[in-house]
Image (spheres, rainbow, N blue to C red):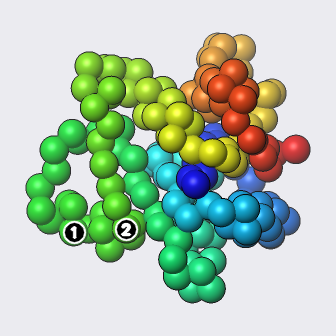
Amino acid sequence: MQVCFIGHRTIEKTEELRVRLKESIIHFINKGATSFLFGSKSAFDHLSWQVVTQIKKEYPFIRRIYVRADYPKIDKAYEEYLLGLYEETYYPPRLQNAGKYAYVERNYEMIDNATYCIFYYNENHVSQLQRRSGTKIAYAYAVKKKKEIVNLYL
């Protein structure tokens, strides 16, 4: 089973958030999760990677997977760099012609492949100028797909 992480680019990193994130990850490991899917570009992705990496010391069988939204093909040096941080990386074929919507499609890919989704989604985060955020779009998609969701913003 897989878990994906999706959240806003900027978040308030608190000790309480870190603890709730860790508890959620361990809860899903106890339910059978073994792989964790990460995107990039957000503070929540980074925090989630840090917490999973810490937990990996206690649960060495878990796998961190980086789902790229950029670079369908990567050179050996970049691949080695990524594999120093993750156990696996891939570029989903469905992103091939996604253009500026690559991040939306990448999030859909992660949600489709996950049993559980951990979000940091604040419905009031979106400004009047920006009617829809990537996190908002992904959250609505996860709800539509009937995924088990933990929203750590709440």
Relative side of 29 to 23, left or right? left
Query: With respect to residue 150, does 106 lie above or below?
Result: above
Question: Residue 87 has which mark?
Answer: 2
What x and y, as percent, mark residue 96? 25, 26
Instruction: Looking at the image, tell me whether mark 1 or mark 2 is earlier in sequence order.
Output: 1
What x and y, as percent, mark residue 124? 80, 27
Residue 140 seen by the camera = no
Query: With respect to residue 9, does 89 lie above or below?
Result: below
Q: Amino acid at mark 1?
A: Glu
Q: Which residue is painted at 53% across and 71% down in the image?
A: 62
Relative side of 97 to 17, left or right? left
What x and y, as percent, mark residue 27? 77, 64
Q: Residues within 10 Å of mark 1 (few under 14, many from 20)?
A: few
What x and y, as percent, mark residue 60? 52, 82
> Of the residues tagged 1 and 2, which is closer to the observer?
2
Distance from the alpha carbon under mark 1 to that under mark 2: 10 Å
Relative side of 23 to 112, left or right? right
Residue 26 seen by the camera = yes
Q: Amino acid at mark 2?
A: Glu
Q: Which residue is painted at 71% across and 14% down in the image?
A: 128
Q: Quadrant of residue 88?
A: bottom left
Residue of label 1? 80
Q: Which residue is painted at 33% across and 26% down in the image?
A: 94
